[in-house]
Amino acid sequence: MRLYLIRCCALALAAVLALAAPEARAEAKKDFKVCWSIYVGWMPWGWIQDSGLMKKWADKYGISVEVVQINDYVESINQYTAGTYDGCSMTNMDALSIPSGGGVDTTALIVGDFSNGNDGIVLKGKKDLPAIKGQTVNLVELSVSHYLLARALDSVGLTEKDLTVVNTSDADMVAAYQTADVTAVVTWNPLLSAILETPDSHKVFDSAKIPGEIIDMMVVNTGTLADNPALGKALVGAWYEAMAVMSKDDAAGKKARTAMAEASGTDLAGYDAQLATTRMFYTPAEAVAFTEGPEVVKTMDYVRNFLFSHGILGEGAPSADYVGMAFPGGKTLGDTGNVKLRFDPAYMRMAAKGL
């Protein structure tokens, strides 16, 4: 069975975390833990731990780094936010809404990839997006699927008021689509591919049409990183060595991707198919160029407004400006006195120059 995760903003959890435990006290230390969950773009973290790459790079800088898999994605963010972990894999949207919205100053250390077709909207018996008007749409509410729907509707002059959203578990999505009553869904791979195998099903919009907006990252606590630069160096060093291996179609690359595939419950062909709809940044130079580009600021403006309009940008947030964000070149969004999410390519830039 293929395993996958809900890359979502859990409303109830966000409400709890907005009361959040105080930000973990930053200090110089030697032992660190980061966590990750199963998703195509995060599978390298498991291989980095199992292959010994993490130990190799941690030893280089005189520290210890444990990379821990957590089966529940939202729980991994919960534990990072509470200070149990120094870093965690998550999307840009979830980083803003949960830890940053809950008051934990967070840095996007590694911008690993963005969804480039992994998320999509499917209509039954209809071939064009405008036909979604008036329909009931099944999706994981307040997830990146919900965000994708909002962006899609905006592209054709529609809003959520023009349809009805029904919250549907990812575990139930494929089965629900097989019923006569369900005519429109928004979901991600591998569910998306499975649903599209149903006759008279049509993908009318996908994340390739909003490239760079659903971003997968490894984030770390900003204070911890500031006091422990060795952690940043070890993580980016291990990550980009893994990228160099898995990006090649030689024996070593196939072996690495096969291990990642098996760990995620699929085979090499299945994993490679998911990679085909994921824009991986295999080199630090690619990641730096993307992070320093103007589109990230534009994307995060979309994201913060979506979160605020749905009531999940921090407890009692008075406006979309509530949580400040910092970007390369001194650019900011929101309250500069409350900057809690930082897109800082400094360590990726170090990796590009050789650590």
Image: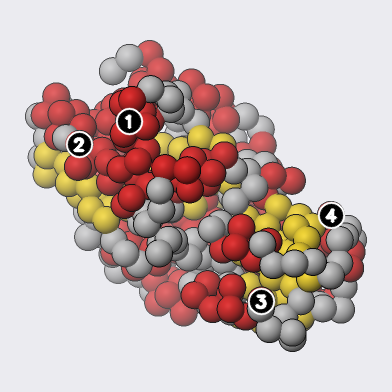
Quick one: quadrant of the N terminus? bottom left
Q: Residue at x 58, y 78 (%)?
A: 175
Mark 1 nearby-residue class (10 Å; few <14, some 14–19, many ≥20) = many
Residue 245 drawn above or below residue 277: above
Q: Residues within 10 Å of mark 3 (few under 14, many from 20)?
A: many
Whether residues under marks 2 and 3 lie with C-beta atoms below 8 angstroms apart, the answer is no
Q: Name the N-terminal-most of marks 4 and 2.
A: 2
Q: CB under 8 Å between callouts 1 and 4?
A: no
* CA distance separating discs 4 and 2: 44 Å
Q: Which residue is mark 2?
A: 51
- The answer to whether residue 121 is left or right of residue 115 is right
Q: CA distance from mark 1 to mark 3?
A: 37 Å
State how far apart marks 4 and 3 are (Cα): 25 Å
Callout 3 secondary element: helix
Q: Which mark is residue 155?
A: 4
Tell me, for residue 177, which label it has, or none.
Answer: 3
Measuring 72% from the left and 80% from the top, which residue is drawn there? Answer: 182
Q: Can you tell which mark lies on residue 242? A: 1
Q: Amino acid at mark 1?
A: Ala
Give the Cα distance between marks 1 and 4.
37 Å
